[in-house]
Amino acid sequence: MADGRVLARVAASIRARPVARAAALLLLFFYSLAVLAPLIANDRPYFVRDASGAGGGRWPLFESLSRLDVFLILLWFLTLAALLFGRRRWILGVALLVALVFGAAPGRATLAPSDWKERIAAGEFEAQSAVFPPIAFGFAETNLAESYRPPTWLDSAEISDAGAYVRGPRAPVPDPVTGVVPAPSPVPVRAGEPARNSPWRHPLGADSLGRDVLARLVYGARVSLAVGLLSAAALFALGVLVGAAAGYFGGWIDLLLSRGIEVVLCFPAFFLVLLVLASADPRVLPPAVSIAFVIALVGWPSVARLVRAEVLRLRDADFVVAARALGASPLRALVAHVLPNALGPAIVAAFFAVGGGALVEAALSYLGFGVQVPIPSWGSLASESHHAGHWWLQLFPGLAILVSVAGYNLVGEAVREALDPRLASRPEGAR
Amino acid sequence: MLRYLTRRIAWMIPTFLGITLLVFAAARATPGDAALMVSSAPESADPSLGAAAQRAQFRAEHLLDAPLWKQYLHFLGPWDLSPRGHPRFGGSGAHPWHGLLAFDFGNEYGRPTVPVAEEIARRLEVTVPLALVSMLLAFAIAIPIGVLSATRRGSFLERATAFMLYALHATPTFWLGLMLVLVFGAAGLGWLPVVGLHDQDATALAPADRFLDLARHAILPVATLTLPTLAYLSRQVKGEMVEALESGYVRAARARGLPEGAVVRGHALRNSLLPLITLAASILPAAIGGSIIVETVFALPGMGRYAYEGLLARDLNIVLATTTVSAWITFAAILLADLAYAIADPRIRHG
């Protein structure tokens, strides 16, 4: 399994399995949502024309993009192009991974809802020429009159002029924290938004502050996907480092590291994650990044064990002995000859760790140790209301987590069959 | 066998010390001044002192300003190193023993009359039965499912189960709990209670009815803990079974003319069960970690919930105690599994 061919083998293995191919495409779709989130769901229009008639116009959405967003989006299109046409695609893939990880926290500039809808309504700009994104809501844009509004394609979500629900027994539910029942008030339909009772207004409902769940779901993909990726990458790096050192150098180094692995392994990982996370300072690291590192911190031993076993197996293999005899230093023999052949099982484990990391992030968010409001993640969305009446807040984000994790695992199976030497000798479909 | 046992137990000591060090380091890194919480528990403090003096007294009593090595030794025990601790270390002798080795984790910060160790014992009465029942259930269901999926590969039933298990394996535990509440709770079918372990008037019930009430309350939490484990386990069983069914000794058994049922049960299954012993131990940490989630979703007074409360209250005693106890339980389970494996597999016993 020499360096460059790893990716080719993985790609071939995915292509050969229809289920894995579908899962990979689905993940690609989710990642596209994450990267392009500001272009898909935003309270700023793409373009508005001045009402003065001078012919000038503004591009509010593009003006508001942070440099990071622009970088991410450009890189995304470059990667897609490279995936389709290019060679050496893995360089771009790695660059994208890095960029995505740093994009986990949406920029400060896009946090606050804009006043563009008001400016258009006030007649500053031509209302007819305002072009809004497909979802004309920002992820932090509130509309208190629509607090806990069910998905708008349901009959029970129909709202009268006065702001009261027309049909169904569903009374506005008291706020879970304050216990206050909000009095019905007329729903303001701002510029660019679908009509009050249009089924497309809030296809997935609204949350306690009347924020659009679909818009928040699209943005939530950023944190959820990035945490999974970053945690798996960090876990892989740490595990390979420790496992290779323990396996290759042996002796007391191995003894010490193996004991360390055993100690961490017999911890209920989740206790440790909570404990360490409680001590992370959100001012130093964005919560999404510290969550990922903590997950890696408790998850590396499984990778380390795999790498250690493989390195032990290969340490005295003929080709390594030959390399040493030709004058390669121990370190060079390890890095250039042993490791490339020992990483297969670890890569497989890291692949499954991506989905695992996403699950842990969701659980942490549920307990309130996740990302800070108003930045959404799928986990924090699903746990926003525990009231059984607010099923749409719980159902849709959970489904997104489920589908993405299942996608990771399905792709992981394909990777396993491509890379795991234990399977190479086994008949097809043995696991 | 005895040699294996002694070696295995001798290795426990450094691992145990490593666990305590890790717990202590992680808990000490938790920011926030626990002494600030004391004002919420006025009965503990001397009313004649000001708030600042009370806090200083609290910090001194709990060794919060002491050097780290002293705090660690205090946590490890068995001597109490605080001002009212063992006379040999300059204490008043009012409370000579403390720490892990004395099974004394101190009292709660918020409720100074409640020893943490006693509270944990109370809470374990909820957590341990839940974890055990769900693990047993998971094994009891996963083994037949795994065997059937291995022997009937490609059938519609096998594909349907595989799909279900795959989805279940990718489901966040807390979300599974929320969905079960939605479907079976009062907002959905209304079949099962979703909060706590007993109805409010349960104390008035006869013992048999009381048990029935408990069982009804436990169904959803147990299901939430069981289903993801079940999904994981049955896939493992299937993998082991498929491997066994293709191995030489199964072919040999078939060649001898044994009926297929006897081959599956007597040869393939027996060999596939061996790795499950180790799996059982590796699932336990997940089950205990999952107890935090499940006990939060269903508002159960278990140890996971206790750890979470302690973390929120910045109560170092609770955090240290719950983490250590859960690591101990896991550690003991791994040891038991190793021993069981050694008993079942002569290659290890003699090797």
Image: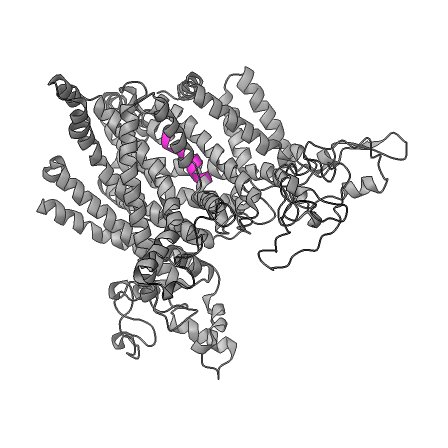
A355 inside magenta stretch: yes
Instruction: Identify whether B306 is placed above or below A2.
Output: below
- Hey, which quadrant is residue B242 in on the image? top left
Q: Residue at x 17, y 43 (%)?
A: B340
Q: Looking at the image, which residue is at 33% across and 51% down?
A: B130
Percent position of residue B345, x then y = 14, 36
Residue B132 % position (x, y): 29, 49
Of residues B182 and B80, the one drawn nearer to the viewer in this rendering: B182
In this picture, is B207 found above or below B149? below
Left or right: where A237 falls relative to A397: left
Q: Is residue A141 left or right of residue B203?
A: right
Q: Is residue A143 left or right of residue B190?
A: right
Can residue B183 be seen from the camera position used here? yes
Residue A148 spot, x, y in % from top left? 63, 47
Range drawn in magenta: A348-358
| Residue B67 location, quadrant | bottom left
- Which SS does the magenta portion mostly show? helix
Tell whether A240 sits left or right of A18: left
**Residue A257 is at least partly visible in this image:** no
